[in-house]
Amino acid sequence: MRNATVSPMDRALLRDELAARGEPPYRAVQVWEWAARGVSGYAEMTNVPAELREELHRELPFSTLEVEQEQRARDGTVKTLFRTPDGHPVEGVLMRYRDGRRSLCLSSQSGCPLTCTFCATGQMRFGRNLTASEILDQALHFRRLGPVDHAAFMGMGEPMLNLDSVLDAARALPDLGITNRRTTISTVGWLPGLRRFVDEVEEPVRLALSLHAPTDELRSELMPVNARHPLAGVLAECRRYFELRRRRVFVEYVMLGGVNDRVEQARALADLLDPKVFKVNLIPYNPTGMYAGSTRKAIAAFEDVLDRARLPATVRLTRGRDIQAACGQLAATSTPGRGVERGFEPS
């Protein structure tokens, strides 16, 4: 083996490494298939020759990420803090639901450069884009804990700033049991990447828009990216996605007490969004230090306005709040004594 930084999740490099050793092409396929099934190491790959398994174990890391800490919430949510080979922190989340769903929240960057004011990740120092294998390694880690069936790119980072790696990882997820239709890629409205996504992605991957305000003025206060890419252009691309793919866009709207949760703002949101194109997820705010969350009464009143306007809307379940694994809480910090986006509720 010539490259000890390769893992089975970088399948192109794995093929090159095995080919250089004189192995037939199907060996790389075998190794990947075992990894996608959730095995914990090369020793379990029983149709791979024992000598090759031993060499792989010695020379080829099974994962590009090191697990630094793992925390488990009362509701069964698991949050894992990973570390890349060059020392950057990354967090991923596994959410377990009572109906049997097992949903992953995956990060595409270490930190995020777009500094949304309500998001803990935006308060971190930005590290770098993750490679496709580093994104996939998050999913593979949770696959080793059991079956998985949904995934959302709503963890640390803006996926449209790292679209090639995100798409490479997303296209491998069906091998783990996560179909394209159960995979969601979120964006705050980074137009260059969003346009590419609309133009180029033919797989039935879902699109989610992190919106959080019905006007440019308020959205720019909450999300500095809006000053560069205002609502009109972003929503036009979302409508184009619907026209081309005939799939609804999921709108994420975090409920901030006294900021964006008034009834008149709900009316403005209903006027802004076409019910045929958009479905709204109202997200109870998970404290990150800057805002107060909306009351249950305010959330119910907001949802009622959307319902009366026939704009599809649901209030998202909060998962993993007690371990800072819920929407907007990922900040890649170790928590002493707690064990070794952004939460997404699939619909």
Image (spheres, helix red, strand yellow):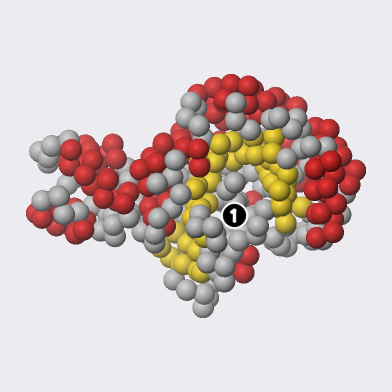
Quarter where residue 291 is shown? bottom right
325 shown above or below 127: below
Residue depicted at 59% across the width and 64% down the height: 320
| Whole-percent x, y for residue 264 in the image | 90, 43
- Residue 157 in the figure: left or right of residue 17: right
Residue depicted at 80% across the width and 32% down the height: 272
Question: Between 156 and 95, which is closer to the camera in this rendering?
Answer: 95
Question: Between 88 and 323, which is closer to the camera in this rendering?
Answer: 323
Q: Can you see residue 136?
A: yes
Quarter where residue 20 is shown? top left
Residue depicted at 79% across the width and 37% down the height: 310
| Whole-percent x, y for residue 209 in the image | 65, 38
Number of numbered discs visible in the structure rendering: 1
The residue sitting at the right extreme is 264
Question: Between 105 and 280, which is closer to the camera in this rendering?
Answer: 280
- Residue 108 in the figure: left or right of residue 59: right
Q: Disc 1 marks which residue? A: 343
Q: Can you see residue 55?
A: no
- Residue 83 in the figure: left or right of residue 1: right
| Whole-percent x, y for residue 93 in the image | 51, 57
Quarter where residue 208 is shown? top right
Residue depicted at 85% across the width and 52% down the height: 301
**Helix, strand or loop at disc 1?**
loop
Label 1 neighbour load within 10 Å: few <14, some 14-19, many 20+: many
| Whole-percent x, y for residue 12 in the image | 28, 36
The residue sitting at the front extreme is 99
292 shown above or below 5: below
Amino acid type shown at disc 1: Gly
